[in-house]
Image: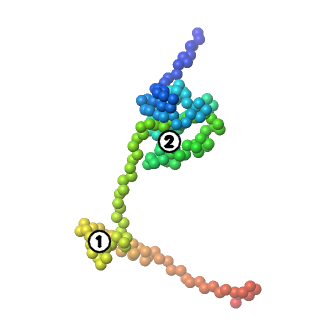
Amino acid sequence: MQEVKDNTTTKLADVIVLTDNLITINKTQYRIVENHDNGFSEERIEERYNTILDKYDYIVGDWGYDQLRFKGFYEDERKESTLDSRISHLEDYLIEYCNFGCAYFVLEKVKKAPLKTHRHVSHKFHTRNTHTKHGNKTNANNDGNKKNTNNHRKKKKVIKRHVKKTTAKKTFKIRKIGEKNK
């Protein structure tokens, strides 16, 4: 008996082409930014797509040895992005990791996640400039903190006194060429 092979491939994603440069992958819209050497293939994306790529702002698909490989990139301003995962690193990625002259495509997510804003947290550092002149205190709540920091400073000074090393002074005499030591 011969076994019959099933040539149907399983779809890992639903890809719908809306216009020439707009597609949806699993109900998420992407714009085709670049399609170098017709690297974009709807059928192969359906076979190879992984949902881990949903978190990225850009998806790059490149071809090597008849295999489609994906790499995700973030916007440069994203806090969670590393240097290698920023879209400005795309050219370096294509040169370093892709086959020379390979076909590739770049998809940009239409509705990206909002950028996380950096919260400005004010830290109060105790320096000479933060204290007021003539010992005036600006806030009653800081009185205890100032006492603690003063004690902390005294401890640091004590530690520094014990750490200091004494070195013997060395004297040198400059002599002329050909002159011998005495």
Quadrant (top left/top right/bottom left/bottom right) for the C terminus: bottom right
Q: Going 51% across and 45% down the picture, which residue do you hit? A: 86
Question: Which residue is under mark 2?
Answer: 73
Whether residue 127 sits left or right of residue 53 in the image: it is: left
Residue type indicated by callout 2 = Phe
Q: How many marks?
A: 2
Judged from this view, the residue extending furthest toward the bottom is 182
- Element class at badge 1: helix
Q: Which residue is mark 1?
A: 147
Q: Which residue occupies the foreground of this view, 23 or 181?
A: 23
Secondary structure beneath label 2: strand
- Can residue 139 be seen at all in this image of the molecule? yes
> How far apart in space, not on screen, are marks 2 and 1 (Cα)?
50 Å
What's the mark number on residue 93?
Answer: none
Quarter containing the N terminus: top right
Left of 29 or right of it: where is 97?
Answer: right
Q: Nearer the viewer, residue 66 or 178?
A: 66
Amino acid found under the numbered disc labelled 1: Lys
- Which of labels 2 and 1 is toward the front? 2
Q: Position of residue 169 (x, y in %)?
A: 56, 84
> Residue placed at 50% from the left, 36% from the top?
107
